[in-house]
Image: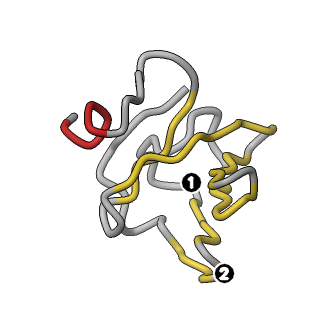
Amino acid sequence: MKCAKESNVDISKGCWVYSFDENKIFRAEKEGNKLHAYEDGKVIGTFKYSFNKILWIHYDEKYTANWREKELDLTRAMQGFVFP
């Protein structure tokens, strides 16, 4: 991924969230059924999911996010990405 190379981020190590809108990669940490994204040590986004893998498509699963203080329902927008 070009953005990762430009930012000197090794996406094979650790957990990361990519923002298409901002074209930036953010460090992330998993906590139960939540994934928190950080910028400058502060939480800027939290993804909540009801399946055991975030962003995995299942017909009866729910996905929501709070990104920079905006509440988003991602259930219908998901494209099938899988993150640990």
Mark 1 or 2 closer to N-term?
Answer: 1
Above or below for 17 versus 8 = below
- Horizontal side, residue 55 vs residue 43: left or right: left
| Residue 59 point in image, percent of width and height | 45, 53
- Mark 1 lies on residue: 61
The number of discs equals 2
Most foreground residue, 30 or 57: 30
What residue is shown at x 42% (from left), y 17% (from top)? 12
What residue is shown at x 38% (from left), y 54% (from top)? 24
Of the two numbered discs 1 and 2 in the rendering, the one whose residue sits closer to the viewer: 2
- Mark 2 packing: few (<14 Cα in 10 Å), some, or many (20+)? few
Q: Secondary structure at mark 2?
A: loop
- Horizontal side, residue 68 vs residue 42: left or right: left
| Residue 8 point in image, percent of width and height | 37, 29
- Mark 1 packing: few (<14 Cα in 10 Å), some, or many (20+)? few
Report the disc number at residue 81.
none
Would you identify the image quadrant in which residue 64 lies?
bottom right
| Residue 38 point in image, percent of width and height | 66, 51
- Horizontal side, residue 19 vs residue 75: left or right: left
* The N terminus: image quadrant: top left
Would you identify the image quadrant in which residue 72 lies?
bottom right
Above or below for 54 versus 47 = above
Would you identify the image quadrant in which residue 71 lies?
bottom right
| Residue 5 point in image, percent of width and height | 26, 31
What residue is shown at x 41% (from left), y 29% (from top)? 9
What residue is shown at x 57% (from left), y 22% (from top)? 14
- Mark 2 lies on residue: 69
Give the farthest residue toward the bottom: 70
- What's the residue type where badge 2 is placed? Glu
Q: CA distance from mark 1 to mark 2?
A: 23 Å
